[in-house]
């Protein structure tokens, strides 16, 4: 009988303690999940703002490396074709380097398209220069402006369209 009363005493204190322990454990887990959800929501809000800014900057990048805009911005009457070519290539590379961190906020497919646009722009500058190396700087510039329309319709417009589609995914 004495053992039974000891067991009952132990059960009398143990069962409520276990109930309190499990309730506190469940409450703590809920509080942790709530805090993590609030943290994720805050992070998502901040990330969305950064992502939106990245898309804006990439559209600006596409516009700033358009051959027609580069020619107008960088060409001067006293510039020789080799110097002009180098100025164009440096401008495209600097724009790219200025925006390289934006790849953290966009899809890999979109970033690959951005790199393709940059590489094709630089390739057209180089190939056009080779074609007009012996000619005047004006002919070189005119050829670049003509090739701008081809590059813009083939790649530039598609890149900007892809940017708009990604923006729609995140901001609707």
Image (cartoon, rainbow, N blue to C red):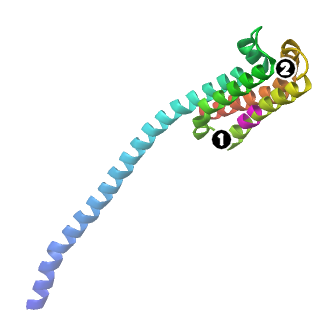
- Quadrant of the image containing the N terminus: bottom left
Q: Secondary structure at mark 1?
A: loop
| Start-end of magenta stretch | 114-118
Q: Position of residue 134 (x, y in %)?
A: 91, 21
Q: Is residue 75 visible?
A: yes
Q: Nearer the viewer, mark 1 or mark 2?
A: 2
Which residue was labeled with disc 2? 144
Q: Is residue 30 above or below residue 46?
A: below
Q: Position of residue 110 (x, y in %)?
A: 70, 37
- Quadrant of the image containing the C terminus: top right
Q: Secondary structure at mark 2?
A: helix
Sooner in the amino-acid sequence: mark 1 or mark 2 = 1
Residue name at image x 91 percent, y 17 percent: 135
Res. 65 image quadrant:
top right
- What secondary structure is the stretch in magenta mostly built from? helix
Q: Is residue 172 visible?
A: no
Which residue was labeled with disc 1? 107
Residue name at image x 43 percent, y 37 percent: 42
Q: Position of residue 15 (x, y in %)?
A: 21, 72
């Amino acid at each position: 009988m004495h053992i039974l009363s000891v067991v009952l005493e132990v059960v009398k204190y143990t069962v409520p303690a276990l109930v309190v322990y499990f309730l506190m454990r469940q409450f703590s887990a809920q509080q942790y999940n709530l805090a993590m959800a609030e943290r994720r929501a805050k992070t998502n809000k901040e990330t969305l703002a950064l992502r939106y800014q990245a898309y804006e900057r990439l559209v600006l990048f596409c516009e700033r490396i358009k051959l027609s805009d580069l020619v107008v911005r960088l060409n001067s009457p006293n510039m020789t074709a080799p110097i002009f070519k180098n100025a164009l290539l440096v401008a495209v590379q600097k724009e790219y380097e200025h925006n390289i961190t934006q790849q953290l906020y966009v899809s890999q497919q979109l970033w690959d398209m951005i790199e393709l646009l940059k590489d094709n722009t630089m390739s057209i500058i180089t190939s056009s220069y080779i074609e007009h190396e012996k000619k005047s700087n004006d002919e070189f510039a005119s050829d670049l402006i003509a090739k701008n329309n081809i590059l813009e319709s083939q790649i530039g417009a598609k890149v900007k369209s892809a940017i708009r589609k990604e923006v729609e995914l995140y901001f609707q």
